[in-house]
Amino acid sequence: MAEPEPRPVPGPRPRTGPLLAVAAICAALFAAAAVTVSVRHGAPFAPERAAVRWSVAHHGEPALSLARALTDTGGGPIPYLAAVLAGLLAGRGTLDRIRAVAYAVVVLAVGQAIRFGLMQLLTRPRPPVTDWAQAASGYAFPSGHATTAALAAGILAWGIARRARPAVARTWCAVLAVWAAAVGLTRLYLGVHWPVDVLAGWFLAAALLALALLLEPYAVPRPAGRGDPPPPGIPMNG
């Protein structure tokens, strides 16, 4: 008779102390920004107005076209494709990969839902429409593109870190961090967000990613005794 498939068991527990600290600090920073925006009824600070004026004064080609192309990667299907790829990289075997993909997509979807709910609650107006270099919809705080890109970058970094060697994983983490930061900055350059909107999106994403990592050993348990080889061309941790 064939041996039964090993039961999934929780993976190595992450260091809860640093993750809890990151989640608490980023959540506190986000809360401070949200309270400030609420108390001011969405009115921008003088440095925020100056930042928008600077971006409008520096609109030109090819920078505008590049910014529009880059900002589009922070929304739509691309973040979800990144989440699916992260799950495929993180898993071992078919069922494990399905579980990892589901967890990655749920983390991204929940993060977007939380962001949308907060945006509807705080109702901060965007900069004047005359300053926009690209169409935008909804309220400003927190930035949807900044939040979503940071979440997608963190999720994909998680998938790579579970599969690649540490040096490779660190390189990709740096690349993904630069991409997420660039997407957020394009929202400022295109004149559709105030700087605090983008910062708040990054803080919110970081807090949610830290919490997701704390839950990861239980949501994506590693099958006991299974050592499926990685896909060709992707080195394992060593």
Image (spheres, grey):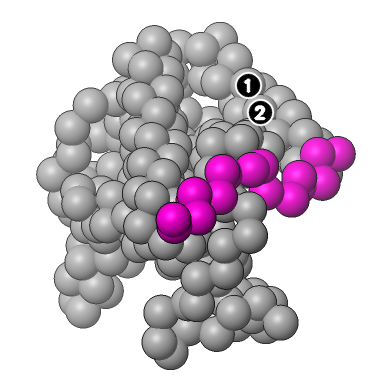
Q: Up-down: is 162 above or below 41?
A: below
Q: Note whether residue 101 is visible.
A: no
Q: Which residue is mark 2?
A: 27
Tag 1's secondary structure?
Answer: helix
Single out the residue that lies furthest toward the left: 135
- Magenta stretch, residue numbers: 1-17
Q: Which residue is mark 1?
A: 31
Q: Position of residue 9 (x, y in %)?
A: 64, 43
Q: How many other residues sit within 10 Å of disc 2, few (<14), some (14-19) or many (≥20)?
A: some
Q: Amino acid at mark 1?
A: Ala
Residue at (49, 49) in percent of width and height: 4
Residue at (41, 79) in percent of width and height: 231
Choose between 78 and 128: the one closer to the eye: 78
Q: Quadrant of residue 137?
A: top left
Q: Please give left or right for residue 14 compared with residue 61 in the image.
A: right
Q: Quadrant of the C terminus?
A: bottom right
Single out the residue that lies furthest toward the right: 17
Marks 1/2 in contact by CB < 8 Å: the verdict is yes
Q: Count the marks: how many?
A: 2
Q: Please give left or right for residue 29 compared with residue 235 in the image.
A: right
Spatial separation of the CA atoms under disc 1 and disc 2: 6 Å
Choose between 222 and 67: the one closer to the eye: 222
Choose between 14 and 129: the one closer to the eye: 14
Residue 7 highlighted magenta (yes or no): yes
Q: Position of residue 222 (x, y in %)?
A: 59, 51
Residue at (63, 21) in percent of width and height: 31
Q: Up-down: is 55 above or below 10?
A: below
Q: Amino acid at mark 2?
A: Ala
Residue at (50, 71) in percent of width and height: 228
Q: Quadrant of the N terminus?
A: bottom left
